[in-house]
Amino acid sequence: MKIKFADRIKVIEETKIEQSLRIIEEHPEIISLGAGEPDFPAPPNVVKSAENFLEKGYTHYSPLQGRHELREELVKKLKRDNGINSNSDRIIITCGSKEAILLSILTMLNPREEAIVPDPGYVAYRPIVELIGGISKPLPLKESDCFEIHPDVLRKLITKKTKVLVINTPSNPTGTVLSKNVLEEIADIAVDKNLTIISDEAYEKLTYDGSKHISIGSFNGMDEKVITIQSFSKTYAMCGFRVGYAVADERIIKEMKEFKVCTTLSAPTFSQLAGIEALKNSSSYTKTMLKEYDRRRKMIVKRLNKIHGISCTNPKGAFYAFPNIRSFKMSSGKLADFLLKKAKVVTIPGTEFGKYGEGYLRLSYATAYEKIEQALDRIENSLTKL
């Protein structure tokens, strides 16, 4: 019997990221520079906190909007770290930041309306927009602009159908940290064109070389225009705990909460409570991770720029290098396949992040320093044969 699938299955294809995870599991000799999560374990105090809550029986559902005590703690965090004045009614706890992105787009975008998304940009933006029947419009980010958003380019993309703008700072995959001047121009455009900004700030604590993360939601007059999305996954190496959150106008949060009935109901209860411990007592752990990421970042960029045919800009945030590989005269997908076969190293083709990612690879330095060195040795030796 023929199975009649929904048309929307065509929106999402198997990705190189999923393939790489499977390959690594089957072939331990392969080194992966594809990881999109910290290689650090969660902070010991957070793990202990989670254990304690599990032992006390916190194994049931939480309220749809999230535990009140966690939201109250996030009010303090958002004021202290991001300059965002909020209250607990303006915050929703989600099952990771990706659910927050999904709920935001479900709430703010109708079918056939447009969302502008960064390209190259995080792999989930386009599919989520298109799954609900929206139109995803790529916002080209160029290496010559250090992958910053160019306000003039953004303005030209906006039509009467454009309703949402997604920004990501610090960025996956480019490592770009949007400057205050650019963010101010984006804010002006959003007000002028009546756009809702979804600001994905999952890597907010991972910045280097004096770069400062700025939340566009902290700007005057942007309370009703911005949905700020953050996460415990990257800041505290809590990916498996599945806790993210969004802060926005209370009316937006109310509607996002209604959709939770159709998604996850709630993030894990013990994880939410352990998140309070992370917020209160794990800042030093985050700084330790950041220091090590910075050490790896400097090494990987230096080594990549010494390989003939590769050039790499200096990422200011997140934990990815995004080297230019155009001189090899092959697609990023083919070069990634070549490196997997010949060098036994997993890299992610730039096209995974949009059509403007062609000519680049994403290499994660969220893996051990020595492993990165070994992987780069293999890459260099293999590319010399091309």
Image (cartoon, grey):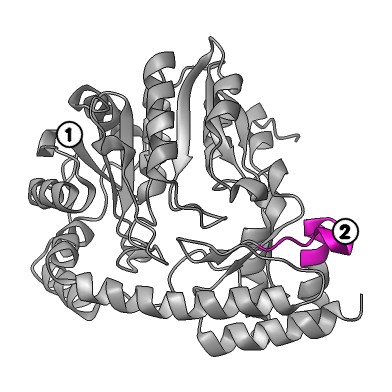
The amino acid type, in three-letter code, at marker 1 is Arg
- Estimate the x, y position of residue 63 in percent, counting from the top left: 16, 42
Tell me what residue is drawn at x 41 percent, y 20 percent.
195
Going 53% across and 73% down the picture, which residue do you hit? Answer: 365
Three-letter amino acid code at disc 2?
Met
Q: Position of residue 274 (x, y in %)?
A: 17, 64
Which residues are the magenta region? 323-336
- Quadrant for residue 224, please give it: top left
Instruction: Answer with the quarter of the image where residue 329 lies.
Output: bottom right
Residue 347 belongs to the span the image colors magenta: no
- Residue 14 visible, this angle: no
Could you classify mark 1 by the number of other residues whose Cα lies within 10 Å: few (under 14), some (14-19), or many (20 or more)?
many
Q: State how far apart marks 1 and 2 are (Cα).
A: 48 Å
| Residue at the spot of label 2 | 330
Instruction: Please give the label number shown on residue 90.
Output: 1
Q: Secondary structure at mark 2?
A: loop
Q: Residues within 10 Å of mark 2 (few under 14, many from 20)?
A: few
Who is closer to the viewer here, 230 or 128? 230
Screen quadrant of the C terminus:
bottom right
Compared to residue 378, the image places residue 246 above or below, namely above
Tag shown at residue 103: none
Residue drawn at (11%, 64%), measured in percent from left and top?
A: 57
Upstream in sequence: badge 1 or badge 2: 1
- Residue 364, above or below 288: above
Which secondary structure, mark 1? helix
The answer, for residue 239, to whether it is visible in the render is: yes
